[in-house]
Image (cartoon, grey):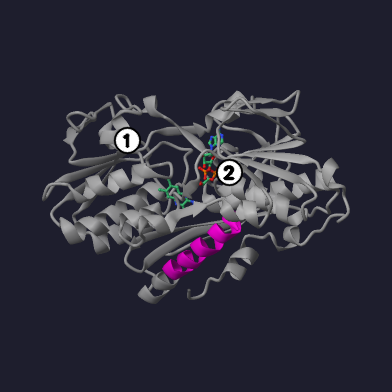
Amino acid sequence: MAGFTRRKFTKLAGFAAASTMLVAPNIARAARPKVVVIGGGAGGATAARYIAKDSDGAIEVTLIEPSKKYYTCFFSNLYLGGFRDYESIGHTYERLASVHGINVVHDWAAGVDKAAKTVTLASGAKLAYDRLVIAPGIDLKYASVPGYSVEAATAMPHAWKSGTQVQLLKAQVENMKEGGTFVMVPPPNPFRCPPGPYERVSMIAHILKQKNPTAKIIILDPKEKFSKQALFTEGWAQHYPDMIEWIPASVSGGVKNVNPETMEIETDIETFKADAACIVPAQKAGAIAAAAGVTDGDWCPIVPATMQSKVDENVHVIGDASVASAMPKSGFAANSQAKMAAMAVRGALVDAKTFPPRFANTCWSLIADNDGVKVGAAYAAGEDKIEATETFISKTGEDAALRKATYEESVGWYDGITKDIFG
Ligand SMILES: Cc1cc2nc3c(=O)[nH]c(=O)nc-3n(C[C@H](O)[C@H](O)[C@H](O)COP(=O)(O)OP(=O)(O)OC[C@H]3O[C@@H](n4cnc5c(N)ncnc54)[C@H](O)[C@@H]3O)c2cc1C
């Protein structure tokens, strides 16, 4: 892929120093310290892999994840837009087990006893740990959108967790009647993947332009502004003129009710009748975080340098579930935080050398064929917060060659990060 190799990703993600540390090779296997990781997504699988790989087997790592195959949310919009097939965004845990010796347990973590340092599985089994990494991603607060529910998500998918919801949404968009209306309801802040709803609209517009060019897209946003707004607005005018209408809450009064039977979405200004809809409610840390007692409100406060929970130094919380301040909730960010947590865990358990943490993130979005844009930053751990040290963003009016190169960079990134997560 032009320009963005796995090696470059490794460098950009800032973990070269962390990944070269070694530990005493002759630690007796029987006395190996134990790490349990809850959640095999972008954060958890990376943490498990880096703890196992960089401790050279000196730490016993168990990864708990219910699914046998993880479908990434990142690039799921490109699947919606017809740029990827579904299987290309699916990844298994086989290499984490066979190459890195991680015990991969396909089950749910049901409870954590912080005093006894054990995790109870849904099956009833108990796992002991010296350090615990919690990386359960998000749960959806369905009731934040009146009328929305788990059941309603069949008619009006959120498609905000990886898996079959995205397939459902794609089928519903492709089956819309000619000249029909698609309604997108993005979530309020803070939420997973700030540019995600707007990339999703772009990819759905891309499909409709080909298959149903008189269709319309209405965005009923609870917010007054959104990530990369100038770039998306410019791109929509250029590629999909008159197709997309963005309506902020100050104009609509907000969504008052959704009815999955009639496919109606009620606001102060109008009740919109959708032929297909995507409703993404407000979010919170995956439920196991609250069950473990590491949340404060919806999310988990952390010590920036090590991603340790502010509640318990034996627990690290990474990825979307954590309060990472300036860092957005993204797969890139989760992967970056995981490597810093892995370094801290190895430092604590096998005396591996540690370095000042460095974090990184870039979020790419595809607006249309070969029209990619990005926003990103480098970060350092402040006393109380993760802070941005450098930021960058694509500019409006960039030429087509640069936009194509940005898209190709994102494809290289996807290849690099999924190898970095799953081995
Ligand atoms: C449409 C969309 C587009 C996106 N695009 C991008 C992008 O281009 N770039 C980017 O960087 N990010 C993107 N993201 C965001 C990215 O997907 C998330 O930020 C990232 O997956 C967070 O990683 P995580 O490890 O915190 O959570 P997840 O990746 O969701 O992993 C959590 C895992 O924990 C498991 N789990 C939950 N509870 C339990 C339990 N009790 N026991 C055991 N396992 C449990 C789940 O099954 C899941 O596999 C996008 C998201 C969406 C929705």
- Taking the spot 38% from the left edge, 24% from the top edge, the residue there is 143
Q: Quadrant of residue 99?
A: bottom right
Q: Quadrant of residue 385?
A: top right
The spot of residue 368 in percent (x, y) is 31, 63
Q: Which amino acid is tagged 2?
A: Gly
Q: Which residue is mark 2?
A: 319
Q: Which mark is residue 141?
A: none
Q: Position of residue 254 (x, y in %)?
A: 30, 31
Q: Tell me which residue sits at (81%, 48%) in the image.
A: 347
Whether residue 25 sits left or right of residue 248 in the image: it is right
Ligand 1 within 8 Å of disc 2? The answer is yes
The residue to which callout 1 is attached is 249
Badge 1: how crowded within 10 Å, few (<14), some, or many (20+)? some
Q: Is residue 264 left or right of residue 95?
A: left
User: Residue 318 lies in magenta, yes or no?
Assistant: no
Looking at this view, is 151 or 326 the one in front?
A: 151
Q: Is residue 241 visible in the rendered structure shown here?
A: no
Give me the C-alpha separation between circle 1 and circle 2.
Answer: 29 Å
